[in-house]
Image (cartoon, rainbow, N blue to C red):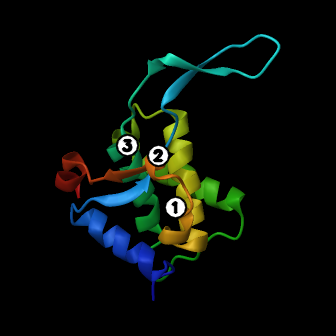
Amino acid sequence: MSALRKDVLKVLKDWKAGKPVRSLELGHVHRMKENPGSSPLIDINQHFHQDQDRAHAYLFHILEAFAHEDVRLPTTYEQFAGTCDILEAGFRDATEGLTAEELDGAESLAWKVLLFGWTRAIDGHKDAQYIEVTRPKVQESAT
């Protein structure tokens, strides 16, 4: 039996089939600007759109690695992060150009999903924070 919860397996199956998946945006959508003497501020003049499909492809690549029966979940985040370093290296072509925040966001959400399941991991946010992502065509032809 897989180490993943049933809701995670269903979302992973939907992703692999090219169906839209409800998720959260990974990374930041605004650039920050310095605010001397205080915390940085959001620069509303510099909104940028990130590559959510590819960031989520990395997220699902991580989850897929833990979907096998013989794979055990790490007991600490540090162990998990070490595994992600290896997974990212093997997925480099697909992750090239993603921001550190997107990569870290994918890893962070994957960790939460592994611990609590998909539904609990993304639950509790405002409606505006949810997005739908679909498996990129590049990934479909590569696997």
State the separation of the CA atoms marked 3 and 1: 15 Å
**Which of the two marks, 3 or 1, is nearer to us in this view?**
1
**Which of the two marks, 1 or 2, is nearer to us in this view?**
1
Q: Which mark, residue 89? A: 2
Graded by Cα atoms within 10 Å as few (under 14), some (14 to 19) or many (20 or more), the crowding at tag 1 reads: some
State the separation of the CA atoms marked 1 and 2: 26 Å
Disc 1 to disc 2: CB gap under 8 Å: no
Q: How many marks?
A: 3
Q: Nearer the viewer, residue 100 or 22?
A: 22
Residue type (three-letter) at the residue carrying disc 1:
Ile
Q: What residue is rendered at 70% in x and 56% in y?
A: 78
* Residue 1 in which image quadrant: bottom left
- Residue linked to disc 3: 52
Q: Is residue 68 at all visible to an observer of this figure?
A: no
Could you tell me which secondary element the residue under label 3 belongs to? Answer: helix
Q: Nearer the viewer, residue 26 or 35?
A: 35
Residue type (three-letter) at the residue carrying disc 2:
Ala
Graded by Cα atoms within 10 Å as few (under 14), some (14 to 19) or many (20 or more), the crowding at tag 3 reads: many
Indicate which disc, 3 or 2, sits on the residue closer to the N terminus.
3
Residue 10, horizontal then vertical, whole percent? 35, 76
Disc 3 to disc 2: CB gap under 8 Å: no
Could you tell me which secondary element the residue under label 2 belongs to? Answer: helix
Q: What residue is rendered at 55% in x and 52% in y?
A: 107
Could you tell me which secondary element the residue under label 1 belongs to? Answer: helix
State the separation of the CA atoms marked 3 and 2: 19 Å
Residue 140, horizontal then vertical, whole percent? 20, 55
Indicate which disc, 3 or 1, sits on the residue closer to the N terminus.
3
- Residue linked to disc 1: 122
